Image (spheres, rainbow, N blue to C red):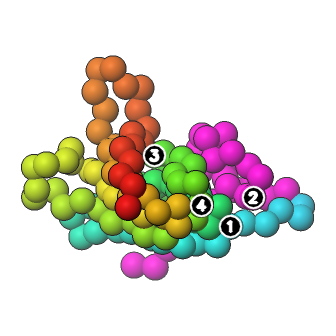
């Protein structure tokens, strides 16, 4: 199935401000967008796409019923520099919460992210950093 992902936040826009996909579709004149550095989707959760960009931003989207219908689940300024790799953590392993994913960046860190909520968290992505 072919589809188009939403635009990322334009350069200079805080990704947290874009609380919905509709806000990402606003394109002020003269803005530029960061290069895509990594995309991730798995067969176990094909409706979830994670995209990472050269400006260190990262977005998690859920595909809707139609190919170009998206919901923004979360966004973050993920690393000190560009995010270069994104990998979903296999759900068959019990060591991390379901829905976890791992990122690496030019800042030399590997970060583990969880989309799981508990009663003390409002939601969004929660990260742990490992220096390499």
Q: Specify the segment rendered in magenta.
A: 1-28
Q: Nearer the viewer, mark 3 or mark 4?
A: 4
Residue 68: x %, y % from top left: 52, 65
Q: Secondary structure at mark 4?
A: loop
- 1 or 11, which is in the foreground? 11
Mark 2 → mark 1, Cα distance in angstroms? 6 Å
Circle 3 residue: 73
- 107 or 53, which is in the foreground? 107
Mark 1 → mark 3, Cα distance in angstroms? 20 Å
Mark 3 → mark 4, Cα distance in angstroms? 22 Å
Mark 1 / mark 3, whichever is N-terminal: 1
Residue 47, visible in the rendered structure: no
Q: Secondary structure at mark 3?
A: strand
Tell me if residue 37 comes above or below residue 29 in the rendering: below
Circle 4 residue: 81
Tell me if residue 66 comes above or below residue 119 in the rendering: below
Kindly identify which numbered label has been placed on residue 11: 2
Q: Main secondary structure of the magenta part?
A: loop
- For label 4, the crowd category at 10 Å Cα-Cα, with few meaning under 14, some 14 to 19 and many 20 or more, is some
Q: Nearer the viewer, mark 1 or mark 3?
A: 1
Mark 4 → mark 1, Cα distance in angstroms? 12 Å
Task: Pick out the residue farthest to the bottom.
Answer: 2
């Amino acid at each position: 199935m072919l589809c188009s992902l939403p635009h990322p936040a334009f350069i200079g826009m805080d990704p947290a401000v874009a609380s919905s996909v509709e806000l990402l579709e606003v394109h002020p004149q003269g803005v530029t967008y960061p290069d895509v550095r990594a995309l991730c989707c798995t067969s176990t959760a094909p409706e979830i796409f994670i995209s990472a960009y050269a400006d260190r931003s990262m977005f998690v989207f859920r595909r809707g019923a139609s190919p170009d219908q998206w919901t923004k689940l979360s966004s973050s300024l993920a690393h000190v520099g560009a995010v270069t790799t994104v990998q979903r953590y296999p759900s068959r392993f019990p060591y991390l919460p379901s829905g976890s994913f791992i990122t690496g960046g030019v800042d030399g860190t590997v970060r583990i992210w969880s989309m799981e909520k508990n009663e003390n968290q409002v939601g969004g992505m929660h990260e742990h950093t490992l220096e390499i």
